Image (spheres, grey):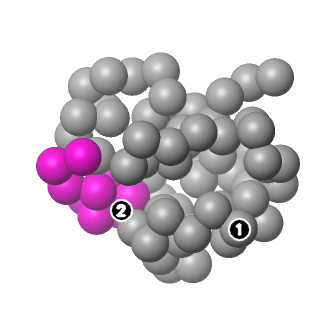
Amino acid sequence: MSKLLDLMRKLGSDAALAEEYGKDPEAVLRRAGVTDEERRAMLESDYAAVGKLTGLAEGQYATNHTIKAYDK
């Protein structure tokens, strides 16, 4: 699993991590070890890029200022 997809799943299930991401997304993304391209996609809420980078189809992720992945 990609580091980005793993982070997105954690953001969808870990309220403390999601709160931290809301305050300092750069720090959370750095700690997760995502690539520069993945970091940009998340920070810019570029849903098309996130889908391409993770292989997720629309409907497999949701947003509320943070892009989160959900299992099928």
Judge whether 16 appears above or below 63 on screen. above
- x and y percentages locating residue 32 in the rendered image: 44, 51
Tell me: residue 31, above or below residue 10: below
Give the residue drawn at x 24%, y 46%. 22
User: In whole angstroms, how far apart are the C-alphas of marks 2 and 1?
Assistant: 21 Å
Q: Position of residue 63 (x, y in %)?
A: 50, 43
Instruction: Indicate left or right for 32 with 68 as reference.
Output: left
Q: Mark 2 belongs to which amino acid?
A: Arg
In the foreground, 61 or 55: 61
Magenta region, residue range: 22-30
Label 2, secondary structure: give it: helix
| Rendered location of residue 10, percent (x, y) | 49, 31
Question: For the C terminus, which image quadrant?
Answer: top right
Mark 1 crowd level (few <14, some 14–19, many ≥20, 10 Å Cα) = few
Q: Which mark is residue 48?
A: 1
Question: Can the viewer see residue 6 in this picture?
Answer: no
- Tell me the residue that label 2 is attached to: 30
Q: Is residue 44 above or below residue 21?
A: below
How crowded pointer 2 is (Cα within 10 Å; few <14, some 14-19, many 20+) is rated as few
Tell me the amino acid under the disc marked 1.
Ala
Q: How far from the left and from the top, in percent, is residue 23? A: 16, 49
Query: Which quadrant would the N terminus be assigned to in this image?
Result: top right
Of the residues tagged 2 and 1, which is closer to the observer? 1
Magenta run includes residue 24: yes
Residue 33 in view here: yes
State the residue at coordinates (28%, 64%): 26
Q: Secondary structure at mark 1?
A: helix
Q: Which residue lies at the image location 74% right of the left edge and 24% below the top edge? A: 71
